[in-house]
């Protein structure tokens, strides 16, 4: 945690709004990663919830542990691309 965040809890998981915004953004990144890897998958809903996030997916196959590792790796790639979304732009402008 940066020195700024040690004193300012605005951008930590102790701040409920930040936590919800983070998880909401993660659900979008998850959906984007799945669509990049499996364009045939249909997206349903992907909300943030009290303890994280999820996405309902309609796929013509069952996801495996290997798929999850591949999706996580794609999510990391997406994060490194530093794409701007409505939810992350707020974080960036206030950080």
Image (tube, rainbow, N blue to C red):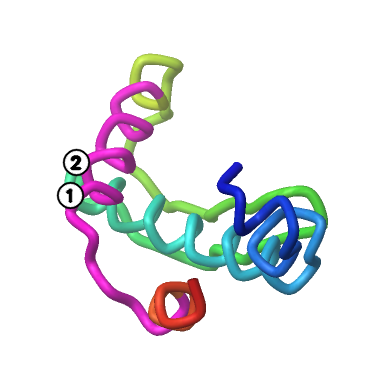
Residue ID at (50%, 58%): 27
Above or below, 63 against 55 in this view is above
37 vs 23, left or right, is: left
Q: What x and y, as percent, mark residue 28?
A: 42, 63
Q: What x and y, as percent, mark residue 38?
A: 21, 44
9 vs 95, left or right, is: right
Above or below, 43 against 72 in this view is below
Disc 2 crowd rating (10 Å Cα; few below 14, some 14-19, many 20+) is few
**Residue marked by disc 2:** 37
Q: What x and y, as percent, mark residue 41?
A: 29, 52
**What is the count of numbered marks?**
2
Q: Nearer the viewer, residue 69 or 67?
A: 69
Q: What x and y, as percent, mark residue 56?
A: 54, 55
**Residue marked by disc 1:** 36
| Quarter holding residue 16 | bottom right
Q: Of helix, strand and loop, which one carries label 2?
A: helix
Q: Nearer the viewer, residue 82 or 68?
A: 82
- Can you tell which mark lies on residue 15? none
33 vs 11, left or right, is: left
Query: Which image quarter is the N terminus in?
Result: top right
43 vs 76, left or right, is: right
Residue ID at (31%, 39%): 76
**Inter-mark Cα distance, 2 to 1:** 4 Å
Magenta span dominant secondary structure: helix
Residue ID at (56%, 47%): 2
Task: Tell me which segment is drawn in magenta.
Answer: 69-87
């Amino acid at each position: 945690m940066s020195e700024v965040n040690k004193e300012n809890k605005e951008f930590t998981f102790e701040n409920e709004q930040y936590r919800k915004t983070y998880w909401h953004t993660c659900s979008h990144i998850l959906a984007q990663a799945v669509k990049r890897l499996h364009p045939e998958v249909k997206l349903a809903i992907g909300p943030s919830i009290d303890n994280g996030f999820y996405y309902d997916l309609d796929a013509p196959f069952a996801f495996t542990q290997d798929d999850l590792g591949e999706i996580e790796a794609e999510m990391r790639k997406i994060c490194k691309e530093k794409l701007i979304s409505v939810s992350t732009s707020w974080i960036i402008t206030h950080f």
